[in-house]
Amino acid sequence: MEKKFEIKDLITVGVFSALYFVVMFAVACFGFIPILMVFTPLLCPLVAGIPLMLYFSKIKHFGMITITGTLIGIIMFVIGHPYPILLFCIGAGLLTEVILKMGNYQSIKHCVAGSAVFSLWFLGMVIAFFFSFREAYFASIVDGYGQEYVEAMKSYTPTWVFFAMIIMCLVGGTIGGLLGAKVLKKHFRKAGMA
Amino acid sequence: MEFGVCSDKSKAFIRLDPRSKLLLLMAISIIMIGGTTVGIEGVLRIICAAIPCLLLLSIRQYKAATIYLLLLGTALFCEKQVAPYTHGMCNIILMMICGLITRFVAGYMMGWYTVKSTSVSEFITAMEHMHCPSFISIPISVMFRYFPTLSEEYKSINDAKRMRELGHPLKQPLTYVEYILVPLMMSTVRIADELSAASLSKGLSAGGKRTHICEIGIGPIDIVAIIGSITMFVLFLVY
């Protein structure tokens, strides 16, 4: 357990971040349909929680999940999301790190909690719809997407939805974590891969 | 990314440094996704849409460039000419699809160009020149090296699954997710092990300063690209 941080760990980080990112992105694509967009914070962590749990089972050192968070933040930022996403991603990564550390990177309960907390980075992606970003964001998309789309989006996202989304992230992450634990038990423990 | 040490020089008309590619990518994504279509931002959008096309042509990806232009052209045409005549749900769906294409396809193509035209080795060298710590640069390069592998694996798994007529994505979504994800996760674990064995034999974990065979450097074209993207950023933020 107390071995040094190695290149091997960095490669694990890279590969699993890629898998997590792709799964997340695939599910998030449903979010472009206005009404489903409100539920992406529930759906994405739910599916992405499965590979995330396998990743957690591979983590042995402090810092790996923070790097994953940072990477996702950087990629999201480079492909054009506003800057708060960086703060959300790094913050969620750090918090998850602490939770996993408390379980000594072995406890399944802590992993499930970690999966719930890590999915909070998703809020950074939807924050453009809320608070001080709201008006500017909708003004900027009005001639790209059309007035009717903007009106539809506006009616789906009053401020209270943001807090509902926090809960959706946590619930989605928890269910995803539990599903992941089940999948690990069913498929990976036997093969000695987790 | 190419697996060779350096990307093939003879194939490309324009050779950009990975750093200026990243800067351009960022400028294009931010302007295309965040910008409006009127006034100075409209002009910026046209420039941003043209850059990936030129760069794709410069690495002789004629097919990709044509597809890109066709997609963008169709989406713009629908947005301006067809959409105003529709109403309600139809308008929302049409505007959404067109909006998505016009916003994301330029950034996507630029990203594709960046990945296609940069070798892993060049990328790591560039990151080192930027004083990026190895705990960021190594996972990022592994990630981008892994994306194409992931899609290959997905295709094979999907074929194998369909051959046995298991888990239709719409009829049995849960089975579908399980039958795709579990094999993907298995191969991910295996590939992670293989890559770390490879890195061991390349002496990545040996420590000490690493040297590089491939040459990267800021040339005249890079200076144009960097100044261009900074100007676009400034114009975009001011107006």
Image (cartoon, rainbow, N blue to C red):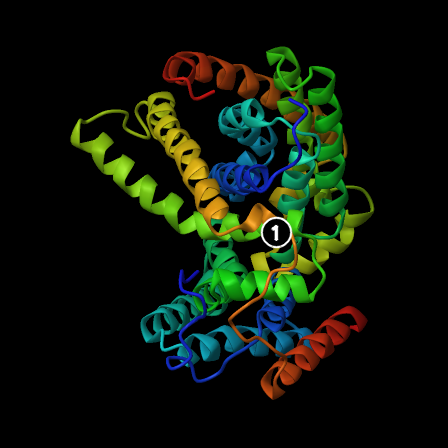
Q: Nearer the viewer, residue A122 or A145?
A: A122
Tell me if A111 is positioned left or right of B163 in this view. right
- The residue pinned by badge 1 equals A75
Q: Nearer the viewer, residue B57 or A32?
A: B57
Give the answer, above or below, for where B191 lies relative to B65: above
Image x and y of residue A57, in percent = 55, 22
- Report helix, strand or loop for mark 1: helix
Instruction: Specify the quadrant that holds the N terminus of chain B.
Output: bottom left
Image x and y of residue B189, in percent: 43, 32
User: Is A46 placed left or right of A1 in the picture?
Assistant: left
Res A161 quadrant in image: top right
Q: Evaluate whether residue B107 shows in this view.
A: yes
B221, above or below B201, in the image: below
Horizontal and vertical percent for residue A194? Answer: 47, 20
The type of residue carrying mark 1 is: Ile
In the picture as drawn, the residue positioned furthest to the left comes out as: B163
- Where does residue A137 sit, x and y in percent of width and height? 72, 53
